[in-house]
Amino acid sequence: MNYQEIGNHSKVTEFILVGLSNHPTSQNVLFWALMFLYLVTLVGNSMIIFLVGINSELHTPMYFFLSNLSLLDLLFSTSAVPLIMVNAMHNFPTISYSSCFAQLATRAFLALAECFLLAIMAYDRFVAISDPLRYNVAMAPRVCIRMALAAWMAALLLTVMPILLFPISFCGHNAVNHFSCEVQAIFKLLCSDTISIEIMMMACAVISMPVPLTFILISYLCILRAVLRIRPTEARFKAFSTCGSHLIVVTIYFGTLIYIYVRPQTKKSQDGDKIVSIFYAAVTPMLNPLIYTLRNKDVQNALRRAGCRVKIRWPRT
């Protein structure tokens, strides 16, 4: 059932997701915790996309990129959390080879796109603070759309390249010690030569994580230099406070991403990887809309206006 005989070798046709199958009492807790996190993620990110769409005051480059970020978080969480919830209700659930790699590629694509988008958002803040008079020209709607498309296309290219250039094979081992198809868990099952794959993965990781992160750090150093030139203390604080939410999101996102994917992988699975992966898939997408909503007066005002419209129209219906 799990293998196809090819000569003297066997080809894996499905994987067994171990997850918490060895801890059945924890499966119900995981299911309801993920249910809560996913609903908050769904409502929070959908709310930001909706508010940016209906409020003309939020039709600015910063909120255009924020709505893209919310869309990425929504898609990323949807690509992982519901499947993990379903698998949490079964002992040793299985997933087909093609479905596993479709999920793997989808999550990699969305994660890479978010890395590039966060770098673009840092550049947006840099232009807004260092050169506000040219901001509307430098970040015109057409430019913003092209930058967002570039982030999505670059992520797609980096996702597809390793798959096309380096076909992989498994030799019978199909038990994935994880909740879903994660790169670090699948990597431990490979029987083919992994040196070339490791080199390609490291190259893609350098392009998709350290490069955008370095760009973000350089952007914020330039922002800090521009802010220090502002004389009134209140104006200086106001200018830098617009970057606070983005800095928090960057720290959480890249910190988790680097821990999971950049550190050297070993053949031995660790339960710690599962916990961090759940945080990355379920908690991080939930935190982003909360961070931007709690620290952003424009979003809060837009939310109040939307609430007032609902109250006014409700008696009429």
Image (tube, helix red, strand yellow):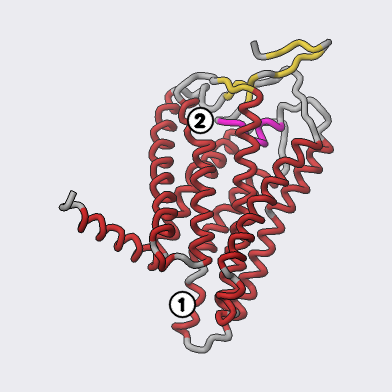
Q: Nearer the viewer, residue 209 or 26?
A: 209
**Residue 12 seen by the camera:** yes
Q: Nearer the viewer, residue 126 or 149?
A: 149
| Quarter residue 14 falls in | top right
Report if residue 185 lies within the magenta region.
yes
Q: Nearer the viewer, residue 52 or 25?
A: 52
Report if residue 70 lies within the magenta region.
no
Q: Could you say where residue 64 lies in the image, as x and y percent from the top left?
A: 51, 61
Residue pictured at 50% horizontal, 81% vertical: 236
Q: Could you say where residue 123 lies in the image, as x and y percent from the top left?
A: 62, 68
User: Residue extending furthest bottom?
Assistant: 231
Q: Is residue 300 left or right of residue 148?
A: left
**Residue 284 seen by the camera:** no
Q: Which residue is denoted by mark 2 in the rendering?
A: 83
Inspect the image, locate mark 2, and give the three-letter code of the amino acid beneath it.
Answer: Leu
Residue pictured at 59% horizontal, 52% vertical: 114
Q: Could you say where residue 245 lies in the image, as x and y percent from the top left?
A: 49, 63
Q: Nearer the viewer, residue 111 or 302?
A: 302
Please identify the dominant SS of the magenta region: helix
- Upstream in sequence: badge 1 or badge 2: 2
Local secondary structure at mark 1: helix
The region drawn magenta spans 180-187
Local secondary structure at mark 2: helix
Q: Which residue is denoted by mark 1 in the rendering?
A: 238
Question: Label 1 to label 2, Cα distance in Å?
Answer: 43 Å
Instruction: Name the image quarter holding the N terminus.
Output: top right
